[in-house]
Image: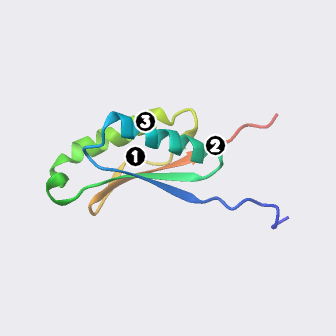
Amino acid sequence: MKANSKQSEVKEIRFTPGTDDHDFDFKAKHAEKFLKDGNKVKAYVQFKGRAIMFQDRGQLLLLKFAERLAEAGVRESMPKLEGKRRSSMFTPKTEKKN
Protein backbone atom coordinates (compact mmCIF):
# COMPACT_ATOMS: atom_id res chain seq x y z
CA MET A 1 0.00 0.00 0.00
CA LYS A 2 2.84 2.37 0.86
CA ALA A 3 4.60 1.62 -2.43
CA ASN A 4 1.52 2.60 -4.42
CA SER A 5 1.02 5.95 -2.68
CA LYS A 6 2.14 9.09 -4.50
CA GLN A 7 4.54 11.41 -2.73
CA SER A 8 3.40 15.04 -3.05
CA GLU A 9 6.06 17.62 -3.86
CA VAL A 10 6.13 21.36 -3.29
CA LYS A 11 6.89 23.25 -6.49
CA GLU A 12 8.00 26.88 -6.27
CA ILE A 13 7.06 29.75 -8.57
CA ARG A 14 9.09 32.94 -8.15
CA PHE A 15 8.01 36.44 -9.10
CA THR A 16 9.49 39.91 -8.68
CA PRO A 17 7.47 43.11 -8.15
CA GLY A 18 8.10 44.04 -11.80
CA THR A 19 6.88 40.78 -13.35
CA ASP A 20 5.20 41.50 -16.68
CA ASP A 21 1.87 40.08 -17.91
CA HIS A 22 3.40 37.57 -20.34
CA ASP A 23 5.76 36.19 -17.70
CA PHE A 24 2.87 36.03 -15.24
CA ASP A 25 0.74 34.02 -17.69
CA PHE A 26 3.63 31.67 -18.48
CA LYS A 27 4.27 30.94 -14.80
CA ALA A 28 0.55 30.59 -14.04
CA LYS A 29 0.24 27.90 -16.73
CA HIS A 30 3.09 25.97 -15.13
CA ALA A 31 1.47 26.27 -11.70
CA GLU A 32 -1.85 24.98 -13.07
CA LYS A 33 -0.04 21.98 -14.52
CA PHE A 34 1.69 21.30 -11.19
CA LEU A 35 -1.62 21.44 -9.32
CA LYS A 36 -3.33 19.12 -11.82
CA ASP A 37 -0.46 16.65 -11.32
CA GLY A 38 -1.24 16.66 -7.58
CA ASN A 39 1.67 18.76 -6.33
CA LYS A 40 1.50 21.74 -3.99
CA VAL A 41 2.64 25.12 -5.29
CA LYS A 42 4.43 27.78 -3.27
CA ALA A 43 4.34 31.13 -5.04
CA TYR A 44 6.50 33.95 -3.76
CA VAL A 45 7.54 37.45 -4.69
CA GLN A 46 11.26 38.06 -4.10
CA PHE A 47 12.19 41.63 -3.15
CA LYS A 48 15.78 42.66 -3.90
CA GLY A 49 17.39 45.86 -2.70
CA ARG A 50 15.08 48.83 -2.92
CA ALA A 51 12.26 46.74 -4.37
CA ILE A 52 11.09 46.13 -0.78
CA MET A 53 9.34 49.52 -1.10
CA PHE A 54 6.88 47.92 -3.53
CA GLN A 55 5.34 45.41 -1.12
CA ASP A 56 1.85 46.37 -2.31
CA ARG A 57 2.73 45.26 -5.86
CA GLY A 58 3.82 41.89 -4.49
CA GLN A 59 0.58 41.54 -2.55
CA LEU A 60 -1.52 42.37 -5.63
CA LEU A 61 0.51 39.98 -7.78
CA LEU A 62 -0.10 37.06 -5.43
CA LEU A 63 -3.81 37.85 -5.13
CA LYS A 64 -4.08 37.97 -8.93
CA PHE A 65 -2.22 34.64 -9.05
CA ALA A 66 -4.72 33.15 -6.56
CA GLU A 67 -7.64 34.26 -8.75
CA ARG A 68 -5.99 32.67 -11.79
CA LEU A 69 -5.51 29.33 -9.98
CA ALA A 70 -9.02 29.25 -8.46
CA GLU A 71 -10.14 26.42 -10.79
CA ALA A 72 -7.12 24.18 -10.25
CA GLY A 73 -6.23 24.80 -6.60
CA VAL A 74 -7.09 26.25 -3.23
CA ARG A 75 -5.08 28.92 -1.42
CA GLU A 76 -4.01 27.72 2.03
CA SER A 77 -3.28 31.15 3.48
CA MET A 78 -3.17 34.84 2.67
CA PRO A 79 0.18 36.12 1.35
CA LYS A 80 2.55 36.80 4.24
CA LEU A 81 5.91 38.54 4.41
CA GLU A 82 8.86 36.39 5.51
CA GLY A 83 12.08 38.35 5.36
CA LYS A 84 12.43 39.61 1.79
CA ARG A 85 9.80 37.26 0.41
CA ARG A 86 6.01 37.49 0.35
CA SER A 87 4.68 33.99 -0.16
CA SER A 88 1.46 32.05 -0.48
CA MET A 89 0.81 28.28 -0.66
CA PHE A 90 -1.66 26.49 -2.93
CA THR A 91 -2.96 22.92 -2.77
CA PRO A 92 -4.70 20.98 -5.54
CA LYS A 93 -8.49 20.75 -5.41
CA THR A 94 -9.73 17.32 -4.41
CA GLU A 95 -12.54 15.78 -6.38
CA LYS A 96 -15.44 14.57 -4.25
CA LYS A 97 -16.28 10.90 -4.65
CA ASN A 98 -19.95 9.88 -4.73
Label 2 amino acid?
A: Lys
Could you say which quadrant of the image residue 92 lies in?
A: top right
Residue at 22% in and 48% down: 55
The numbered disc on residue 25 is 3
Observer-nearest of 78 and 19: 19
Label 1 amino acid?
A: Met
Report how far apart the C-alphas of labels 2 and 1 lie in the structure.
21 Å
Q: x%, y% of residue 42?
A: 47, 53
Q: Do the residues bearing badges 1 and 3 touch, measured as CB atoms within 8 Å?
A: no
Report how far apart the C-alphas of labels 1 and 3 lie in the structure.
21 Å
Residue receiving disc 1: 78
Residue at 52% in and 44% down: 30
Quadrant, the N terminus: bottom right
Q: Is residue 17 above or below residue 6?
A: above
- Of label 3 and label 2, which has the lower sequence position? 3
Q: x%, y% of residue 74?
A: 54, 41
Q: Residues within 10 Å of mark 2 (few under 14, many from 20)?
A: some
Could you say which quadrant of the image residue 84 lies in?
A: bottom left
Label 3 amino acid?
A: Asp
Q: x%, y% of residue 80?
A: 34, 53
Circle 3 or circle 2, nearest the eye: 3
Q: Do the residues bearing badges 2 and 1 touch, measured as CB atoms within 8 Å?
A: no
Q: x%, y% of residue 72?
A: 58, 37
The numbered disc on residue 36 is 2
- Of label 1 and label 3, which has the lower sequence position? 3
In this figure, what is the number of numbered marks?
Answer: 3
Report how far apart the C-alphas of labels 3 and 2 lie in the structure.
17 Å
Q: Is residue 26 left or right of residue 86?
A: right
